[in-house]
Image: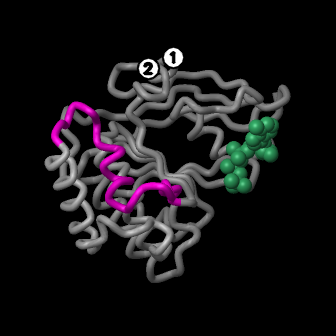
Amino acid sequence: MQTPGKTMALTLSDVTIRLSGRVLLSVSATVMPGDVLTIMGPSGAGKSALLAYIGGFLDPAFVASGAVLLGEDDLIGLPPQQRHTGILFQDPLLFPHLSVGGNIVFAIPEAIRGRDVRRRLAEEALDEVGLGGFFDRDPETLSGGQKARVALQRVLLSQPRLLLLDEPFSKLDMALRQQTRELVFAKARSAGLPTILVTHDRADADAAGGAFIHIGAETQS
Ligand SMILES: Nc1ncnc2c1ncn2[C@@H]1O[C@H](COP(=O)(O)OP(=O)(O)OP(=O)(O)O)[C@@H](O)[C@H]1O
């Protein structure tokens, strides 16, 4: 499965996030297509807020500035749905009122028409991650690792241009964690998606194999 269209680098240019007048973080970095930038830092350092700024869903309690360039386009100023950001959270957040397959079909862009075509794409995506035959299952009956794989395929089929990962492996046990992160990074690489990973686990950063930023919570303005 490939993301159509040209893949582009993601550049954070002087991205600064403040809360109650205090600078939480200030970051500049470039992530090449298919590379993973890992961000670590203490709890409360603003890591999730940074991803929310990039994705366009930052709580108004924060004040943020700086450019987020995909290629040469600044995403800031675009509404979230036009940023084409794929996001995976700690909790896979599958819709409980839809089947496993329905969760994936839901994310396929409307431009891809035809009920059968959409269903086939979802079935292929499930097959690809060892969940062939799971289309009609209730998401609540899946294990954590299975939910994580459904969430990943759902995000990839939404045709994102970048991936934001907010501790998506932290609830998985060690073996599943390794397996799932290898899958996510391999997918990001093959789709050429610039990816930002927020994690507390140095092993995640090592597995990601890309650049690494440690942000602190000490900076004052
Ligand atoms: N809606 C909000 N209004 C006010 N303060 C908030 C809001 N959301 C988060 N905060 C505060 O902003 C700071 C940064 O939060 P954020 O969730 O980005 O940190 P984090 O680095 O992702 O932490 P963790 O590693 O614990 O997930 C924290 O001090 C948090 O309490």
Q: The disc labelled 1 sits on which kind of residue?
A: Gly
Left or right of 90: which side holds 112?
left
| Residue 75 % position (x, y) | 45, 23
The residue positioned 21% from the left and 47% from the top of the image is: 118
Q: Which residues are magenta?
A: 92-114
Q: The disc labelled 2 sits on which kind of residue?
A: Asp
| Residue 89 % position (x, y) | 54, 54
Image quadrant assignment for residue 60: top right
From where the camera sits, is residue 219 visible?
Answer: no
Chief secondary structure of the magenta portion: loop
* SS at circle 2: strand
Image vertical order of residue 132 relative to residue 187, above or below: below
Label 2 Cα neighbours within 10 Å, binned few <14 / some 14-19 / many ≥20: some
The quadrant of the picture showing ligand 1 is top right
The residue labelled by disc 1 is 77
The residue labelled by disc 2 is 74
The residue positioned 41% from the left and 43% from the top of the image is: 86
Image quadrant assignment for residue 40: bottom right
Image vertical order of residue 149 relative to residue 97, above or below: below
| Residue 112 % position (x, y) | 19, 37
The residue positioned 29% from the left and 42% from the top of the image is: 108
Q: Is mark 2 within 8 Å of ligand 1?
A: no
Image quadrant assignment for residue 159: top left
| Label pair 2/1, CB-CB below 8 angstroms | yes
The residue positioned 49% from the left and 52% from the top of the image is: 165
